[in-house]
Every structure is written in structure tokens, then in C-alpha cells.
Image (spheres, rainbow, N blue to C red):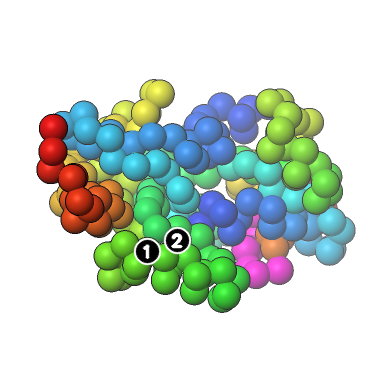
Amino acid sequence: MLTYSRLRGLAVSSDDGQPRGRVLDLIVAPDGEDMVVRALLVVPHRFALLAGRFKPRPKTTTIPASHIAAIDENGIRLRGNDG
Amino acid sequence: MDDDGGRRGLSMGQIIDHAILDRDGHRAGRVDDLQFELEPGRSEGDPPRLVLRAIVSGPVPRPMPSLLGGIARACYRLIGVQDPRPAVVDWSHVKAIDAFVHLDVERVAAGLRRVDEAVLRYVGKLPGAGRE
């Protein structure tokens, strides 16, 4: 099982290893019987992650969850490099 | 990249720390963490799905450094919580979300009152605790 506290702050990178930022938040929506993550809200660096705790609407990039290729302890890898 | 379409939905950051109400409307703690399951795509070539599975609430809900975690668990044991682990409530029990997270289960049955009950037992032993 993955937990929100673990996912938040994970590094996001494209398929070629290019860093895309860090996960600030997750957006979920119903998909049939389940609630499924639809998007990742990503901030460009760790400090923005910290600022996100205090700013009500931090500047984020929205990445659709359909672009996720894999999740492991090193972070979230996206499909291709246009994630 | 999707600029705003993906934002339609429920922000998990807004659920964390929300107060929980059980089926009888009694307070049952706060949402301390959420559990997700990574499922493979439904068919070949489909992306994996991150499915929200459960609410986590209660003592030591998140991994802590061993020393801090040990101290926290020792404190819980001191007040009588012998097995200081958080309650995990399946997401299927969440009936509504507004200012609170509403569950369809009773708080004791869901294990959401263990710390409160331990504190009440401890306070009840103090001299004068039964007096009006």
C-alpha cells in the first residue's frame, strides 16, 4: 500500500530521467466503484513543496495520472518526456 | 499535459486533518493519512491506476524515525494503549465529505476511539475524577 504522506513530496521524472518536480497534492475522482487518482499537482522543487503548506493556492503543474508509468521508492516515472 | 482538466475532483490535501464523524454523528478523530493501491492497467497498454483504499487515523499514523517512533509508542503505552497502531477504515465506509468526513460505521467498532478510551480510563483513576 502507498500512503498519501509517502506520495506527497515524491520526485516526478519523465521517462528519460528529466526531473519534473515533486508531488504537492493528488486529485481523485470516482471511476466506477472506486475513487481513483486523476491528476498529480506538481511543484518545481522541494522548497516550493514547503511553501505549498503555507500558500493557499501555490503555482503547480497538473499532470494527468494516466501519464504515470511506475511508482517506486525513487519517485514517480512518467511515460515519455512530455508528461 | 493537462492544464486544468485534471483538477476537477477531490483534493487529497483538503481531506487530511478533516474531522471524522461516525454513523451516529459522534466525533471519531481526524484523517491522519490515506492509503492508496497501485493497480495495473485494466488491459495491456493501459496506465496503472492509483486507487484510494482507506483512511488512516490514530496513533503513529505515519512512519517516524526509529527513536521518535519508539518514544511516541512508549508514551501511548504509558497511557494504556498497548498496541499503538492507527485505525484503518476502508474508503467504502465514507458516505459524505463536507466540513467533516462522514462514516457509516460506529467509531468504537472502527477502532477510532482507542486513544480516547485509554485517556478516559487514565483520567478516571485520578482522585476526584468522579465528582460533579
Question: Depth check: A18 or A48 in front?
Answer: A48
Disc 2: which residue: B60
Query: Horizontal and vertical percent for residue B34?
Result: 45, 50
Dot 2, how many residues are within 10 Å of its Cα: few (below 14), some (14-19), or many (20+)?
A: some
Answer whether residue A71 is magenta in the image: yes
Label placed on residue B37: none
**Is residue B97 shown left or right of residue A64?**
left
Name the residue tied to disc 1: B76
Residue drawn at x 65%, y 70% is A73
> Residue sitting at 23 percent across and 37 percent down?
B22
Q: In the depicted view, which residue is nearer to us: B76 or B113?
A: B76
**Residue B106: percent from the left, percent from the top?**
16, 43
Q: Is label 2 on the same chain as label 1?
A: yes
Give the side of residue A34 with respect to residue B70, left or right: left
Percent x, y for residue B84?
Answer: 35, 66
Determine whether label 2 and label 1 are within 8 Å by CB: yes
Q: Can you give x and y, in whole percent of width and height, for residue A30 in the image?
A: 41, 36
Asked whether residue B72 is drawn in magenta, I would say: no
Magenta portion: prevailing SS class: strand
* Relative horizontal placement of residue A1, taking residue B101 as reference (left or right): right
> Up-down: is A4 above or below A29?
below
Q: How many marks?
A: 2
Span colored in magenta: A68-74
**What separation in Å lies between label 2 and label 1 (alpha carbons)?**
9 Å
